[in-house]
Amino acid sequence: MIKAILIFNNHGKPRLSMFYQPYSEDTQWQIIRETFHLVSKRDENVCNFLEGGLLIGESDNKLIYRHYATLYFVFCVDSSESELGILDLIQVFVETLDKCFENVCELDLIFHVDKVPNILAEMVMGGMVLETNMNEIVTQIDAQNKLEKSEAALAGAPARAVSAVKNMNLPEIPRNINIGDISIKVPNLPSFK
Amino acid sequence: MVASSSSLKLQDLIQEIREAKTQAQEREVIQKECAHIRASFRDGDPLHRHRQLAKLLYVHMLGYPAHFGQMECLKLIASPRFTDKRVGYLGAMLLLDERQDAHLLITNSIKNDLSQGIQAVQGLALCTLSATGSAEMCRDLATEVEKLLLQPSAYVRKKAVLTAVHMIRKVPELSNIFLPPCAQLLHEHHHGVLLGTITLITELCERSPAALKHFRKMVPQLVHILRTLVTTGYSTEHSISGVSDPFLQVQILRLLRILGRNHEESSETMNDLLAQVATNTDTSRNAGNAVLFETVLTIMDIHSAAGLRVLAVNILGRFLLNSDRNIRYVALTSLLRLVQSDHSAVQRHRPTVVECLREPDDSLSRRALELSLALVNSSNVRAMTQELQGFLESCPPDLQADCASGILLAAERFAPTKRWHIDTTLRVLMTAGTHVRDDAVANLTQLIGGAQELHAYSVRRLYSALAEDISQQPLVQVAAWCIGEYGDLLLEGSCEETEPLQVEEEEVLALLERVLQSHMSLPATRGYALTALMKLSTRLHGDNKAAILEKIPLVERGGSQADEEAKESKETAQLSEAAPVPTEPQASELLDLLDLLDGPSGDAQHPPPLDPTPGGALIHLLNLPCAPPPPAPIPNLKVFEREGLQLNLSFVRPPGTPTLLLITVTATNTSGGDVTHFICQAAVPKSFQLQLQAPSGDTVPAQGGLPTTQLLRILNPKKAPLRLKLRLTYNHFGQSVQEIFEVNNLPVETWQ
C-alpha cells in the first residue's frame, strides 16, 4: 500500500501532498519536513530507497524517491509494494505529467496546482495502483477537462448574451409614426443596460 | 449576486505568494485572501465557489488552516456540475477525513453520484470513497459499489474494484459481497480492471483462509494470464521498456506466492512458468528486474523444485554484484527475507554481502549490516566479527548502536574462546562505547570474573586500554573494576599472552585519579574508580603509601565545606610531598575520602585493614597514627580495653577548618576469639554537631586481624570543651557485651 505521495522542490516547498492514511495535519506537516530532510541529504549516485523516518515508519515502511531537476517525487510505501515497481510508477507519473503539460517543469506544477491531484488520482487511488497506461490516463484527463470547459461555457452564456446585445447596432426608434392621418406617439422605452 | 471582484484568481494568488519576500508577507497575502474566500463562501456567487475552494486548497497545501472550507466541500459535491464536484471531492479528501464530524454528510452525495451514470462523476465519488471512506460509509455504500462492478464502462469497473479493496479493509465482513464477482472479473481484458481484481483477490486471500482455499482453484487461470503477458512480446499499450505491463505481472506473481505457499499442487502448477520467467526475463532495464525479483521471491516462498530454488538464490547473488545500486539494495532485502529459511544458500553469498558493508550509500550498508549479522554462525564468527568491527569503526552514527549490539550478541552466541570473547567485547567498547547497551558492562565483568585463567590477561589489556582513553564510559567502568579486583596481578610479574608491561603502583593510582577527576566521567564511573582504589588499598603493599594518598583527589559531594577541606588538604599534601620518606599519610584526605564513600546512612563495608602496632604487617590507606605535618599531631588515645579488644582514637584537626575535628575510632582484637556484631555509637554535648560515618566492618577478627575503623566528624562552632561518650555493643567469646563510657583525657588540642 502506498501511504503517501509527496512532491517538493529542492528547498522543501511542497508542490503536492497526498496522504492515503488518516494523519492529523500536524503529523502530515512533520512527515513532509522530515522526508525532505532525509531525502535532501542523499548523494546523487546512491540508491533510491530510504528507510522511513520515525514518523511515517512503522519499521515496515520505506521511502522511494526520484529526483528530477528541481523536484523530488517521494512515495512512502509499506513492504507489500515492489520497490523497483514503484520506481517505474514514479516514472510513469512524471511522463504522464509531461504529456499533460508539454515538457513539464516545476512552474507547471506550481501554476496548475489544482490539476496535478486530478492526474495523480487517475493513477493511484486509495493508496493502490489504479492505472499505469499513460494513454488511458491522459485520455481521461482530456475528457474531464472538456467537460469542465463545456460547463464553463454554459455558465458564461447569459453574460455573453448580454454583452452581445449591448454591442449590437440598433436603429433609432422613431418618436412619431405618421401614417396617413393617424399619428402614433411612440412611448419612451427603458433602454437596455 | 455579489462577486468579490477584489479577490484573486488562483493563478494570481499563486503569483502574489511567490512574490512575497518573507514568511510574514506571505502570511499577510494569504490571510487577506482567506478573508475574501470566507466572505465569498458566505454570500458569494455559487458559480465561482469552486474557484474559491481551489484557492483554499492551495493555501492548505502550503500549511495554512482551511477547515472553514469543509462545508463548502459538501455544497460543491452536491452541485450538479462536474466542475464543482471535482474540486469538492478533492477538498473532501484533503479536509474531511473520517475524524471530522461533517464527514458522514457526504455519504448521500456519494450514493447519488455513484448511481447517476456519468462515468467521470462516478469516478470522482469512487475515488473519494476509496481514499477516506469510513467504516460506516462503506457499509452503507457496499451494494452500490458491487453494482458498479458490472458496469459497461471499464473505467468505472476498475475504480469500483479498488474501492472494494478499501471497503474490505475497513469492514472485513464485506468480503462476502466482493468475493463472488472476482471469478468473472478475472476474465477481463482491460489491464486496469485486471490489476484491480488481482489486488482485490490478494486482499481477500490475506484475510481469510477460506478465501485462500477458494482462489487456489484459479491458479491455472492466473498462470495463463501471466504466461500471455510474458510471451506477448512488445505491445505498446502497457509495456514499460519492452516488458508487458510489469505492474500486472508483479501483482500476479505476488498473488501466486500467496496461493502457492504451503500447497504442493498449486506450487506445481506454477513451477514451469516461474522457471520460464526466471530465465527469460530481460534484465537490462528496471521493469524486467522488478518482475524477476518478484519471481525469485515467489519461487523461494512456495514448494518449488530444488533446482529452481538454487537458480533463484543465484539470481539474487548475481544481483548483488550488479552495478545498479537499486538492484543491489533489493537483492540484499530479498536475501534477508530468505536467510532464515534458506540459510546455507544465502551463506554462499556471504563474501559479497560483506563487501556491501563498505558501501558509501547508507541505505545499502544498513541492509548489508542486517544481513551480515544474520549470517554469523559458529564457523565464520571470527572472520565476520573482524569485518563487522571494521565496519563499526567507520559506519554512520545511527548504525553504530545496532552494529555494536549485533557484534556483542554474536560474540555471546558463538564465541570460540573466552579470551576471544573478552577481546571482542573490549574492542567494541573501545570503538563504540557510548552506543552499547547498558548491560554490556555487567556482561563483561561477569565474563572476566568467570574466567580465572584470564584475569591477568584481562587486567593488563584493560589497563592499557584505559591508559589510552578514559572517555568511553563503559570501558572505563569495566577497566576500573578489573584493576580494582586484579590489581595485584597487574603489578606482579608478567603475563605470557600480552606484551611485557611494567606497571608501577603509582601509575595505576595516577590513572584512577585521572578517571576520578575527568569531567567526562559519569558519577557511576567515579564510583567504580573509587571502589577500585579502595580495593587496591588491600591488595597493594609498599611504603610509598603517603605519596599515593596525597595524590588522591577529592570528589565534590555537595557541601562546600568538604570542598574547602579538600582544597586545603591537597595543598598541604603537595607541601609534604617534598619529604623524601613521607610516612604520615594525610589523614584528613583519607577521612574525607571515607566521608565521600559513606552516604548519609552509611552502610558500605570494606574493611580497610589497620594495624597501628609496630608489628603490623600491612600499612594501608586508612593508616592512622596520623600526624598532620606542620601542626603537631594530636596523640592517639586508647579509650577502651577488654579481653583483648582495644579501642583507640586518633584525631585530626584539618587546617583551615578550625571548628572541625575528625576522630577515627579503631578497634583491634588481640584475643583468640573474633569480635562480632561490633557497633560503636557516640554522643557529644548539644552545642556540637556529630556525624558518625559507617564503620569499615562489624567484625574484629582475632589474633590481631584486620581492625575495624570508624570515622567521627565533630563540628565545634562554639569551641566548647569536647566531651565524648561512647557506647559499644558486640559479641565476644559467645557473650554479648555492652559498654558505655565517657572518654576521659581528651587532649585539649581536640577542641581548642
Image: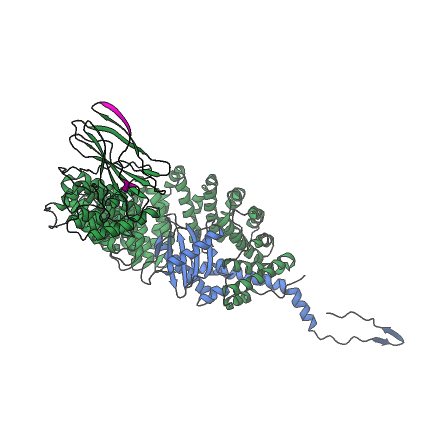
Chain colours: A blue, B green
Check if residue B682 falls in the magenta segment.
no
Check if residue B747 falls in the magenta segment.
yes
The quarter of the picture where residue B730 lies is top left
Residue situated in front as seen by the camera: B738 or B362:
B738
Residue B5 spot, x, y in % from top left: 63, 66
Above or below, comparing residue A153 to residue B497 in the picture: below
Q: Can residue A65 be seen in this view?
A: no
Q: Which quarter of the rendered picture does the N terminus of chain B lie within?
A: bottom right
Magenta span covers which residues? Answer: B733-752
Q: Is residue A53 visible?
A: yes
Residue situated in front as seen by the camera: B284 or B609:
B609
The quarter of the picture where residue A170 lies is bottom right
Residue B523 spot, x, y in % from top left: 30, 46
The quarter of the picture where residue A94 lies is bottom left
Q: In this view, does A169 lie to the left or right of B377?
A: right
**Circle count:** 0
Above or below, comparing residue A25 to residue B530 in the picture: below
Residue situated in front as seen by the camera: B715 or B743:
B743
Q: Is residue B330 left or right of residue B6?
A: left
Residue A8 spot, x, y in % from top left: 43, 61
Q: In this view, does A94 lie to the left or right of B638?
A: right
Residue B124 spot, x, y in % from top left: 52, 53
Picture residue at 75% right of the left edge, 76% below the top: A171
**Furthest residue toward right:** A181
